[in-house]
Image (cartoon, rainbow, N blue to C red):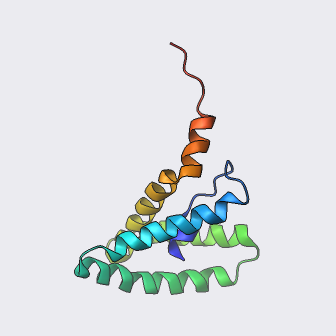
Amino acid sequence: MIVATLTPLWPLLDAEERPAVVSEVARSVTRSIALAPFHIRFAVESVSIVIGLCTVLISAGAGGPLARTLRTDRFYRLLQRMPGPAGSVIRLYRSMTLLAFYDEAPVAEKLLAARPAQTS
């Protein structure tokens, strides 16, 4: 849930590609956290439960998908500025999500295709 809300809304992805990319990014981040040492995994998963619950409650009253996205993004920015485990976990998820997102083949292909031609 947290990973899906942190995945960039990237306009170059087709409507068919986006769900597959988000799913693979979530799988990659989840797998990476699952492979972490127990003391790290336990802390991240414990804080993630609370953050996920808060995210659901905060976005429940929002209107459409854009309003939900804006609310959760504001909540994540607030948490990220806070000292302590919640801010650290959000920074961890944000970093891992972005790395996994740009590592996906459809995203990399679109990035390379959108890159301006270099002239020497």
Q: Which residue extends farthest front?
A: 105
Nearest the eye: 112 or 65: 112
Question: In the image, is 11 to the left or to the right of 42?
Answer: right
Q: Position of residue 91 (x, y in %)?
A: 39, 65
Q: Position of residue 76 (x, y in %)?
A: 50, 69
Q: Give the quarter of the image for residue 72.
A: bottom right
Q: Is residue 74 at least partly visible in the picture?
A: no
Q: Residue at x 69, y 50 (%)?
A: 11
Q: How many marks?
A: 0
Q: Residue at x 43, y 73 (%)?
A: 30
Can you say whether 114 is above or below 48 in the image?
above
Question: In the image, is 28 to the left or to the right of 35?
Answer: right
Q: In which quadrant is the N terminus drawn?
A: bottom right
Q: Is residue 66 at least partly visible in the picture?
A: yes
Can you say whether 97 is above or below 63 in the image?
above
Nearest the eye: 35 or 90: 35
Can you say whether 106 is above or below 52 in the image?
above
Q: Which residue extends farthest right?
A: 64
Q: Residue at x 59, y 23 (%)?
A: 117
Nearest the eye: 118 or 89: 118
Q: Give the quarter of the image for residue 113.
A: top right
Q: Residue at x 70, y 83 (%)?
A: 61
Q: Give the quarter of the image for residue 7.
A: bottom right
